[in-house]
Every structure is written in C-alpha cells, then in structure tokens.
Image: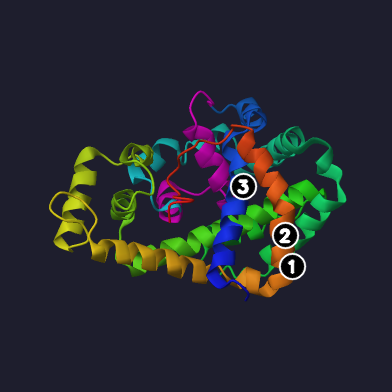
Amino acid sequence: MENGNGRVRQMWHLLEPLHAVLYYAPEVFEEVEALGFDTNERWPSYFALRAAPLGAAGAHQVASAFYSFSPRMVAEYIPAAWDVAAPEKVLAARRRGIDRAYRALIGERTDSPDLAEAAALARRAAEAAHTAGRPLAAANAALPWPQEPHLILWQATTILREHRGDGHLATLLTAGLDPVEALVSFAAIGAAPTEVFASRGWSEQEWAAARERLIARELLDADGVVTDAGRALRAEVERRTDELAAAPWHALGADDTARLAELLGPLWVEVLSSGMLPSQTTLGIGKV
C-alpha cells in the first residue's frame, strides 16, 4: 500500500481523537450521570463506557483487555459499574452522548455529504478488520450499526481504534513487557511525562520494581535512562503495531484511504480545537 506504515500511523492519529470524544464530552457525561454514575472524576464513566461492549465483564477480564491499568484500579470500578447500570443501558447512553457531542462539535456538517462519505469509507475499513484474538475490537464490531452517518463514523472509528490497541498489546507481550513495564519503558522514551502514566494506578513500589527489571534487561541504564537497546525495542513495538493495524487500510485501498484522511482532517481540527481533550496522554501520539 502506498506510504506503507506511514499512512497507517496517520490514520491512527486522525481517528484517535474522534474516538476519544466519548471519554471527555460533557454531553456523554450528562448521559451517564443520568444513569447514576459519578462524573466528578473521569474513571467511573471511562471504565463503564469502554468495557460495556464486553457485557457484564468482571475485573480480571477488563484488566486483561485494558492491559496497562493496575488490576486494583480496575477492581475499584468493575464490576460495580454494572450495579449502577447494565451494559446495554451504558451502550445506549454512550450512543446518545456521542450523537449529541458530535452534533455540538461539527454542527451543520453532521448532515453533510462529506461526512456521509467519510462514514461509508470508515465503515468499509472497520468491517475489513480481523478481530480474532482482539477482544475489544470484536466486542465493538459485534454491536449493531446505527443509521446516522456521524454515528456510523464514530462506531467505525472505535472498532479501528480498538483493533489497533488490541494488536499493540500483542506486540507488548511479544516484547516481554508486562503492563507496568510497558508504561515505564514508554515514559523513558519521552512518550509523556512520568506523572501522566500515574493515572494507570500503579504504586511507586510497582513502578520502581518494573524499572529495576528493565535495568536488569539493559533496556534502561542505572539512572533509569533509556538505552539504545530499550529505544530499539520500543521502536520495534511501534513498527509491529503499525503492521498489525494495516489490514483494514490495505482492504480499503490507497486511494480511498487517502480520501478518508482528507475528509477526516476538518473533523480532527474541530475536535482538537474544542479544547475538550487533554494535551498530554499515555498514547504518545506525535512522540512515537
């Protein structure tokens, strides 16, 4: 495919913010608050909204699928979330919230031919995503498709985002990086400040122990600075992640992928310029 993994990486950069609206939009917070969730902090709704496609999953299943979160942190919110509202009610609330949030963000363009075209292209890519061994992608792909183009676009974006994320976890496992080691090594290459990764709930002792394990593997030096070997391993993780995320874009084809990128640009600008999303995240977009 033209541009190879560079195009795959570009599509992730374009799609990730469009998906992430779910976790930050005030309209979504209003919908889940109406269900009974505490929205004074991010995490009660985050775990419910992201895990709902899995059904009434337990803490171990969600911690496995999310990978980088401390199991203790997951257990604070799952399965208690399903006592607040059943997964099917959370799914309905997230669709209502995204409907309202997208309409607020993009206004008249919600019903534009360009958005309908983008939705159709994104759906084709999402339906080409193989979900074997990818639990979050499979769970979202199993949901019924909405009718409205802006909701089709969001659902396709979410399937593709989780498809990439599931593949990324496979590359971390292959690289021998457990959940906390993955975060420590990612922070070491400058993906985001260490304090940003503290949001994943690991203790200082667990972080320090992971750091020592990476030092023993010569992926960090004695001062915790990434070594050439550590940087090379993280580069390989990202390269392999791109490879595992490429199939939907190969299926869509170079011309249609380029057209989708063109159509997504203005939406991407609207989301980022809204100030809704945090300026730093644990994803390392623009850093890796």
Cα distance between the residues tagged 3 and 2: 15 Å
Type of amino acid under label 2: Leu
Q: Position of residue 232 (x, y in %)?
A: 31, 66
State the image quarter where residue 17 is shown: top right
Q: Is residue 16 visible?
A: yes
Packing grade of label 1 (10 A; few <14, some 14-19, many >=20) is: some
Mark 3 or mark 1: which comes first in sequence?
3
Give the label, 3 or 1, closer to the camera.
Answer: 1
C-alpha separation, residue under disc 1 versus residue under disc 2: 6 Å
Looking at the image, is mark 3 or mark 2 earlier in the sequence? 3
SS state under label 3? helix
In front: 266, or 73? 266
Residue that mark 2 sits on = 260
Q: Which residues are magenta?
A: 38-65
Q: Nearer the viewer, residue 139 or 18?
A: 18
Say left or right for 158 vs 210: right
The C terminus lies in which quarter of the figure? bottom left
User: SS class of the residue under badge 1?
Assistant: helix
Q: Residue at x 53, y 47 (%)?
A: 51
Q: Amino acid at mark 1?
A: Asp
Q: What separation in Å lies between label 3 and label 1 (alpha carbons)?
A: 20 Å
Report which residue position mark 3 lands on. Answer: 19
Residue pointed to by mark 1: 256
Q: How many marks?
A: 3
Which of the pair 69/222 is nearer the observer?
222
